[in-house]
């Protein structure tokens, strides 16, 4: 038994050393392998791995180019670019806020960065208290984290950052002047997206600043010098509301269109057209961006940039508008408003075009600024604001009667007599020239004398009621009649968007509460509202014999020559006929003759304004009873009068169509500016009367400016 136990103990003592020896041997082999591997990596592969660590990555970065410019029809500049020296920054991939803060502090020692802090003023500041805290936070992250509890440090993302910002004190942001400049630089840098170039400073950059930055580019990763541009307007406020604006780099792409622009290769901070012509022709004006091969190191810092393509300036727009004629029309409208406004009237709109092509010759709106009392440009209102136009729509009503068959060439005489339906005095209609008698008028004399009753009886006939006696009930389907008239009016563009090459065009107001004799009032322009540009398209459609043509402001797209001036023609924009009015040539000519009589007939409502005109014009005046909807709050809803005029000349071969709208006049007024302005605009176009010597005067002005 003892012998057996002894053998077991001997076996145990001999086995344990063997296991230890085996373990030591395995450990030795592992260390030997590790040493050999390290030696291999350092000696054999060391140079290769060092190259990989120092290796750079080349990516494509884009830069902005000057925007295309805008010229008038005679190639005189309306919108240009002023070149500026600029300090730029291209953000590398993965560059941290701390890295940018260091670069900003360094750059602040070489340039003066304008800034106004929220500490200095609560208005018009560009560095908010939050901006200052952001800059301190990224520059002092370790110190900031000491102010957090262990639990708070476990937070992530925006929740953690907001907590960090909350820990920044007012004492922390008591910056020196250079630190404030650095904070302003950092804010600009922080707005850049990876591999997108932004301007750090592009105004009042001195030659000394350019030199200092250029000499220290190696110490300023991503920073460079270059050129920028800013929009200029040689003609001041002329057409400013129509020309539109461009976003700033801070604004970048509009939120509602960002996805579309990004899909087309734009960067988020790119400047784009944000309104009217600048927006409508963005693809033409924007140009081709410069392209640069950008080398970044393993930290994402930009170490070298090589420009592969310098980019190409945007193409230029040539407008249909003649700057000299535009100046005259603006002056006519301005003087009219300044000298003859009455009551709540605070605006005047005037548009002129070639009725055969739709080319806008001049477009202006002059409007009183309620805050300053000054008259300002509101050309935009000519396409966006709508008003009751009154009797100016009567030519369309007569042609609607022909199209509907309720009057014919053999049956177009109707008795003008005061109309009264039922016992309600509000259901009474009469013509200004005939308040009590009975006068037979045909289509031509109805237009010359502006018969409300003639138009009302056309509407009655459309509803199936051909007879009238005093006090009878109006037995028509009002909705049916108004919808019929709207359909016919639409052929002239009334109630529809005109198709003008500008965004955000208005289409007017369509009434919906149809009661009593409203369909009859509608027949002479007392219900729906229309924009001045719709009235111009309508007048042009009558002038050219029935073709509704889309009005346009841009005539040509041209490149840029080697000297930076207007280059060769690239695209000639043509006229677009939207529809042709469905009425016979003879019927059309009778309505044209009626409009001729408005100006030349013994009873024409515009006769006095056009006496002695050396050209033959045709037209129609309008006086609409309307409701005030302007800026004076306590006057909203009050009764006003809108005066309008549409016309064209020469009568036999029209070259120009004109629309004038003078809204918000008192119920009792002596204002006749609708026809006075119409006459002045036509005189200016034909260079007659007081405008006979205008060509010489304008030539002198242009020569002096050049």
Image (cartoon, rainbow, N blue to C red):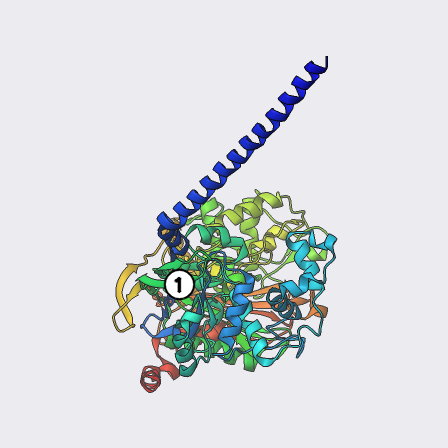
Up/down of 304 relative to 455, above or below: below
In the image, residue 603 above or below residue 688: above
Quadrant the C terminus occupies: bottom left
Taking the image as shown, residue 474 lies to the left or right of residue 376, namely: right
Helix, strand or loop at disc 1? strand
Q: Is residue 162 left or right of residue 182?
A: right
Does residue 469 appear in the picture of this structure?
yes
User: What residue is drawn where x is 31% and y is 72%?
Assistant: 75
> Where residue 364 sits in the image (x, y, percent)?
47, 71
User: Residue 167, how many percent across, how many down?
Assistant: 71, 64
Write down the quadrant of residue 187 in the picture: bottom right
Front-most of 88 and 524?
Answer: 88
Mark 1 neighbour class, 10 Å CA radius: few under 14, some 14 to 19, many 20 or more: some
- Where in the figure is residue 485, as x and y percent of width and height? 53, 49
**Against 700, is 577 above or below?**
above
Q: Which residue is mark 1?
A: 303
Please count the marks in the image: 1
């Amino acid at each position: 038994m003892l012998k057996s136990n002894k053998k077991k103990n001997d076996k145990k003592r001999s086995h344990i050393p063997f296991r230890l020896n085996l373990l030591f041997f395995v450990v030795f082999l592992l260390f030997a392998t590790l040493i050999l591997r390290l030696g291999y990596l350092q000696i054999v592969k060391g140079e290769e791995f060092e190259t990989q660590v120092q290796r750079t990555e080349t990516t494509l970065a884009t830069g902005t180019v000057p925007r295309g410019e805008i010229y008038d029809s005679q190639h005189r500049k309306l919108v240009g670019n002023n070149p500026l020296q600029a300090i730029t920054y291209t953000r590398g991939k993965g560059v941290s806020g701390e890295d940018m803060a260091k670069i900003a502090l360094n750059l602040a020692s070489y340039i003066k960065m304008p800034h106004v802090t929220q500490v200095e003023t609560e208005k018009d500041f560009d560095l908010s208290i939050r901006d200052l805290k952001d800059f301190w936070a990224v520059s002092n992250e370790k110190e900031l984290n000491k102010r957090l509890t262990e639990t708070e440090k476990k937070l992530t993302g925006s929740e953690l950052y907001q907590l960090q910002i909350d820990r920044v004190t007012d004492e922390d942001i008591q910056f020196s002047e250079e630190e404030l400049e650095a904070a302003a630089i950092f804010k600009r840098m922080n707005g850049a997206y990876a591999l997108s170039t932004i301007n750090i400073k592009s105004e009042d950059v001195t030659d000394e600043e350019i030199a200092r930055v250029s000499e220290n580019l190696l110490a300023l990763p991503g920073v460079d010098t270059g050129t920028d541009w800013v929009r200029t307007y040689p003609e001041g406020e002329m057409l400013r509301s129509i020309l539109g604006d461009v976003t700033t780099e801070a604004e970048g792409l509009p939120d509602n269109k960002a996805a579309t622009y990004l899909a087309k290769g734009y960067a988020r901070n790119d400047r784009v057209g944000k309104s009217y012509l600048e927006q409508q022709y963005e693809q033409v004006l924007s140009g081709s961006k410069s392209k640069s091969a950008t080398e970044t190191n393993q930290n994402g810092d930009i170490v070298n940039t090589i420009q592969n393509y310098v980019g190409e300036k945007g193409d230029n727009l040539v407008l249909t508008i003649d700057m000299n004629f535009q100046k005259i029309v603006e002056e006519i409208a301005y003087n009219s408003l300044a000298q003859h406004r009455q009551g709540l009237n605070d605006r005047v709109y005037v548009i002129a075009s070639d009725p055969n092509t739709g080319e806008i010759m001049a477009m202006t709106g002059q409007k009183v600024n309620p805050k300053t009392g000054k008259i300002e440009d509101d050309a935009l209102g000519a396409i966006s604001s709508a008003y009751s136009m009154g009797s100016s729509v009567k030519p369309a009503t007569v042609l609607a009667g022909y199209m509907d068959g309720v009057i014919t060439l053999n049956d177009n005489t109707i008795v003008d007599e005061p109309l009264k339906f039922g016992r309600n005095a509000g259901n009474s209609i009469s013509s200004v020239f005939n308040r009590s008698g009975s006068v037979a008028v045909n289509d031509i004399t109805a237009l010359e004398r502006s018969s409300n009753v003639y138009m009302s009886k056309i509407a009655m006939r459309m509803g199936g009621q051909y007879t009238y006696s005093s006090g009878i009930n109006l037995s028509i389907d009002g909705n049916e009649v108004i919808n019929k008239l709207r359909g016919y009016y639409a052929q002239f563009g009334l109630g529809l968007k005109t198709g003008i090459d500008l965004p955000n065009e208005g289409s007017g107001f369509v009434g919906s509460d149809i009661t009593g004799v409203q369909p009859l009032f509608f027949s002479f322009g007392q219900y729906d509202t229309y924009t001045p540009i719709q009235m111009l398209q309508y007048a042009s459609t009558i002038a050219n014999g029935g073709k509704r043509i889309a009005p346009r402001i841009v005539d040509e797209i041209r490149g840029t020559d080697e000297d930076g001036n207007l280059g060769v023609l690239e695209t000639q924009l043509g006229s677009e006929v939207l529809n042709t009015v469905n009425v016979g040539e003879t019927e059309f000519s009778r309505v044209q003759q009626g409009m001729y009589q408005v100006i030349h007939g013994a009873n024409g409502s515009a006769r006095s304004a056009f006496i002695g005109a050396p050209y033959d014009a045709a037209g129609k005046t309008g006086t609409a009873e309307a409701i005030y909807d302007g800026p004076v709050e306590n006057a909203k809803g009050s009764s006003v009068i809108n005066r309008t005029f549409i016309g064209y000349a020469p009568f036999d071969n029209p070259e120009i169509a004109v629309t004038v709208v003078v809204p918000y006049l008192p119920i009792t007024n002596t204002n006749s500016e609708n026809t006075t302005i119409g006459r002045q605009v036509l005189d200016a176009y034909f260079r007659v009367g007081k405008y006979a010597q205008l060509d010489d005067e304008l030539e002198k002005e242009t020569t002096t400016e050049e």
